[in-house]
Each structure stands twice: as C-alpha cells, then as structure tokens.
Amino acid sequence: MYNNIIMNIFSNPKNSGRISKPDGIFDMYNADQTAHVEFSLRIDSGIIMQCKFRAQANPYIIAVCSKITEVVTGRMANMLFIDSLSVKKALEDESDIDIEFCLDCLKGAVRDYQEKLAKNNA
C-alpha cells in the first residue's frame, strides 16, 4: 500500500515530538477526523531553527510531516512556501490527499508565531 520510502520514514521519523515553550504551535484534525497533527516551531530572528511534529495518523501523513520538518528548518518563517509537488517528489509518491492538510497545520504554527510577535511588539 505504501512505498518503501514512506514506510522507512514512518518507521524512523525525524523531528517527532514537541518543542517545549515553542515560539509557534498549532494542531488540527483532518476533514474526516481520522488524523490529528501538531507542529511546534522554535524561531530566531525570523528563521525556523527547529520544527517538530506530533501525529496520530496513517504512515503517509507521518512521512509527510517528517519531510516537512526537514524542508522548513533554516528557512525564513515569513517567506515560507512549500508546495505539495516537492513533498511528493521527496516521498516518490503522487498522492495529494493529506499533504495540504499537513501544510495547513504548519502554516497555522507560523501564524501563531506571527500573532505572538505582533502582540509582543504592540
């Protein structure tokens, strides 16, 4: 059902867990309530220094989240753009279904950071 890359990442995901005292955090369920994902971020000078995820989901979602954490680390939070095509290529899989769900959760964590930053600067 899942290819070897997805199963290898599922068996050994990178950056799983939660950052204590994150600068940005967000969690959500997918549309049919079968998966729950949380992203937490540590951001310094606008750069994502650390990104972790927690998920109660299928192997594909866990693999997607793990790849996303690798891709965003070291990138500017306010210029964050990841398309589903780059994630699909990394996983060598053509499924679109859950990638946007995971990306929306990540974007929520970035929004949380930006809202906290704006509140502190007000």
Image: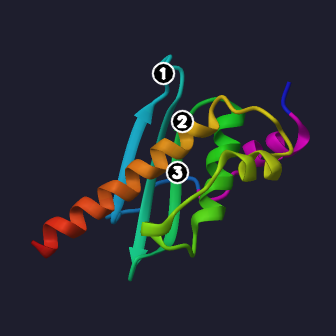
Q: x and y percent of residue 44 in the render?
A: 40, 80
Give the number of the disc on residue 106: none
Question: Residue most toward the top?
Answer: 32
Q: Secondary structure at mark 1?
A: loop
Q: Nearer the viewer, residue 51 or 46?
A: 46
Q: x and y percent of residue 32 in the render?
A: 50, 16
Q: Amino acid at mark 2?
A: Phe
Q: Determine crowd level at label 3: few under 14, some 14-19, many 20+ residues with C-alpha closer than 10 A.
A: many
- The quadrant of the rendering that contains the N terminus is top right
Q: x and y percent of residue 39 in the render?
A: 46, 51
Closer to the N terminus: mark 3 or mark 2? 3
Residue denoted by label 3: 53
Q: Secondary structure at mark 2?
A: helix
Residue denoted by label 1: 31
Question: Residue most toward the right?
Answer: 4
96 left or right of 90 in image: left
Question: Residue most toward the left?
Answer: 122
Is the image coloured rainbow, by chain, by secondary structure, or in one colour? rainbow
Q: Which residues are magenta?
A: 3-15
CA gap between label 3 and label 1 equals: 19 Å
Can you tell which of label 3 and label 2 is closer to the viewer? Answer: 2
**Residue at point 69%, 51% (across, down):** 13
Q: Nearer the viewer, residue 15 or 98?
A: 98
Residue denoted by label 2: 101
The answer to whether mark 2 and mark 1 are in CB contact below 8 A is yes
Q: Amino acid at mark 3?
A: Phe
Q: x and y percent of residue 10 in the render?
A: 73, 42
CA gap between label 2 and label 1 equals: 9 Å
Classify 77 as above or below 64: below
